[in-house]
Amino acid sequence: MITATEYAARRAKIFNQMKEGSIAILFSGVAKKSTADETYPFEVNRNFYYLTGVDDEDCSLILMNSEGEHREFLLIPPFDPNKEKWYGKRIQTSEAKEISGIKNVLFNSALNARVDSALSGSFSDFGDIKTVYLDLESELKIAEATSTHDYRDNLVRIYQGITVEDIYPTITRCRMVKSKAEVDELREAIEHTRMGILAVMAQARPEVKEYELADTFLHTINDESGYQGTAFNTIMAAGVHATTLHYPKPMGTVAKGDLILMDLGARHGYYNADISRTIPADGEFTDLQRTIYKIVLDCNKAVANFAKPGVTIAELNSLTKEFLASECLAKGIITKKEDIGNYYFHSVSHHIGLDTHDPGERAIPLEAGNVISDEPGLYIKELGIGVRIEDDLLITPTSCEVLTEGVIREIDDIERFYKDRKE
């Protein structure tokens, strides 16, 4: 569990990177319209959540660095008994203070006046504010028809002489290095995912529908996590469907002889697991399936052995392409190394955290505390075989820890699971 003390420490890091005479304004966001009078389920802006721990919509955070002093204000919606009748309980002032560690909690109706006081100079105690930091990630809605880009344009129009800078890179660089508490949240998400994968394996067999397996995973992780849901839309793909990287609709029927590729994850406290496993519908790999699976698994292990501080994700991907090309060439799957691009066409790694694909640059060397994926794959459409094995790695001071080590993946262990299931 992330504590108020940790949220305060995160804000302190941001304060230390803000200019003297500056203000940062961040928003939790609002639900986006889906159709007619319906909206998509609300998902809190992860940068706002990272700094506050508050996941209600229509909230905002002000950080002010002026006159040698750091001030912070959290603004939340006022209590509205009629809205609560329709939409349930919303965060109260006392809860917001306890979760975030911010003492100054106001109602969001005060946002414009508070910003105007700072930028117009009408409240001398704020000092001279010339720089405004906003999270300018695209598509961040802060009202039904307003984005942070619109908000920026409005500020520049009203307050001449201010400079607006994007604070998104500053926050996301902080997010790349995970604390022990964050890693503990990821471990919880991984454990729930492990239980979901075992439930899928217990049900997987020819004639079952792909969506039945996806539903089993969802029900299992929700039972384990207290209805925290999936990290992303579950990919459950059998046979040739597994050669589509982000297979969108699990409507197919598992056939005899198919491999079933699952790419899935639970989340815990908004921290996401991201795991891929590939299993035989019949409980036993064919010789060809075994050969392809072993190439991918050996590559997965090679990446984990190479991942450490100082290495870049780009270098991990170069290793992956060379490994898969060499092994496929040796096994007669391809006739020249350049052909590997037909069967492996994505990066082997990305950062993991509050977003399944957490912000992070491929060219920045890894450092202790990063959590990344390790997901080589081979997708051979003409053979109807797709294999991906994805683990989550915690970069340590000298190497890495495979956080998903306990999630079944060895050929013998998978086949033994099926044998034991039948007995």
Image (cartoon, helix red, strand yellow):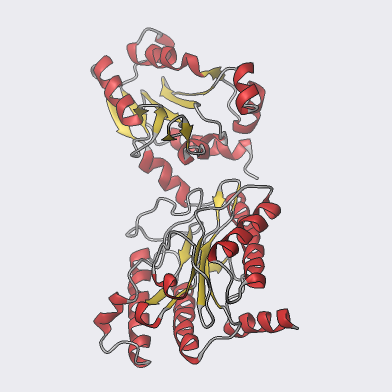
Position in image of residue 284 (x %, y %)? 58, 86
Residue furthest to the right in view is 423
Quadrant into which the C terminus falls: bottom right
Q: Is residue 131 left or right of residue 171?
A: left
Q: Quadrant of residue 331?
A: bottom left
Q: Please say if 254 is above or below 396.
A: below
Q: Closer to the camera, 408 or 417?
A: 417
Q: Residue at x 63, y 61 (%)?
A: 216
Q: Is residue 361 left or right of residue 399?
A: left
Q: Closer to the camera, 374 or 249?
A: 249
Q: Residue at x 23, y 16 (%)?
A: 160
Please say whether residue 56 is visible from this viewpoint. Answer: yes
Q: Closer to the camera, 121 or 62?
A: 62
Position in image of residue 364 (x %, y %)? 35, 57
Q: Residue at x 66, y 66 (%)?
A: 199
Q: Please say if 136 is above or below 419.
A: above
Position in image of residue 137 (x %, y %)? 35, 39
Quadrant into which the N terminus falls: top right
Q: Closer to the camera, 213 or 395?
A: 213
Position in image of residue 288 (x %, y %)? 46, 89
Q: Is residue 108 left or right of residue 118?
A: right
Q: Please say if 2 is above or below 126.
A: below
Please say whether residue 19 is visible from this viewpoint. Answer: no
